[in-house]
Image (cartoon, rainbow, N blue to C red):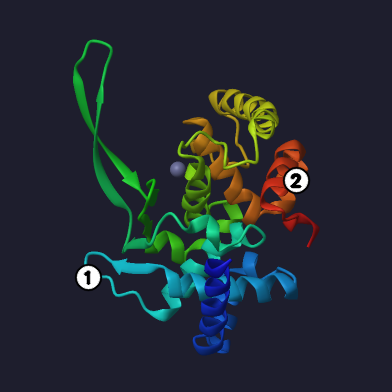
Amino acid sequence: MVASWWRRWRAERTLARRPIPDELWRLTLARFPFLGQRSAADLARLRELSTLFLADKEFAGMQGLVIDDGMAVAIAAQGCLPVLQLGLGQYDAFKGIVVHPDIVVARREVTDEDGVVHGYDEELAGEAMEGGPVMLSWRDVADAGNSAAWGYNVVIHEFAHVLDMRDGVPDGVPLLPDRAARERWLAVLEPQWQDFCARVDDGEDTLIDPYGAEAIDEFFAVASEVFFVDAASLRAEHPALYELLAGYYRQDPAAQ
Ligand SMILES: [Zn+2]
């Protein structure tokens, strides 16, 4: 009781004292048209959530990158879109957002069946780890207005992973009320994923990023990207998947 009162009081104070300036908000919506197309009510809510997100999270620029207000608002607004109806509490498990100027090359190792370790480089536009921080490539974040045309959005991708990990495991299933809900979720998501993998294996051009064939948690993340930046196409091509995501996110972006 006391905690929720305190939280609300602090939120109201932040909204009153440190609102995102009108001009910066207008520029952000113009820069990312998939945000600007939302209803006035959604946008008012998104602006509030983004303001509270900025007050709560800590941004760190890497390799000399200086995070200015425009960059922070660009990340906050895209990051808050998935939790527009779920609330910012969904992101309580992490504080830090680490921003690199561009893609990061990470050295990875895999051990094969014979126990031989192989090293390889993986290029990352973003990464979400349990407990944080969330890592993002600024070049990819900044280009999100253009890359929406091919359903790509690194911020939504990584924040979908954050939601997926709320139950402790990155398995394509976000935190759901009970076991039955989890089974209903998998009854839709798994066949959708398997069908998608078969199409990717056949070399088909897919609306959803073929990277989703890597694992079911990646499929949830890449499908979420399309859900938020090209909703009408997702609803037309994958109605069952669209319904599943609309139910979870409590949003129907294709209807706007
Ligand atoms: Zn991913």
Q: Quadrant of the N terminus?
A: bottom right
The image shows residue 138 at horizontal and vertical percentages of 38, 64
Crowding near pointer 2: few (<14 within 10 Å), some, many (20+)?
many
Mark closest to the chain's N terminus, 2 or 1: 1
Ligand 1 lies under 8 Å from the Cβ of mark 1: no
Ligand 1: image quarter: top left
- In this image, 103 relative to 54: left or right? left
Residue at (65% x, 50% y) in the render: 227
The image shows residue 150 at horizontal and vertical percentages of 58, 51
- Extreme residue in the top direction: 114
The image shows residue 20 at horizontal and vertical percentages of 53, 83
Q: Name the mark on residue 64.
A: 1
The image shows residue 44 at horizontal and vertical percentages of 67, 76
The residues bearing labels 2 and 1 have C-alpha atoms spaced at a distance of 41 Å
Q: Is residue 212 visible?
A: no
Q: Give the quadrant of residue 252.
A: bottom right
Q: Is residue 203 visible?
A: yes
- In this image, 29 relative to 132: left or right? right
Give 189 or 36, whichever is nearer the viewer: 189
Q: Quadrant of the C terminus?
A: bottom right
- Extreme residue in the right direction: 255
Query: Circle 1 — which element?
Result: loop
Amino acid on which the number 2 mark rests in the picture: Arg
- In this image, 14 relative to 249: left or right? left
Query: Eyeballing the image, is 236 above or below 201?
Result: below
Q: Name the mark on residue 235.
A: 2
Query: Eyeballing the image, is 66 above or below 62?
Result: below
Residue at (30% x, 67% y) in the render: 60
Are discs 2 and 1 less than 8 Å apart at CB?
no
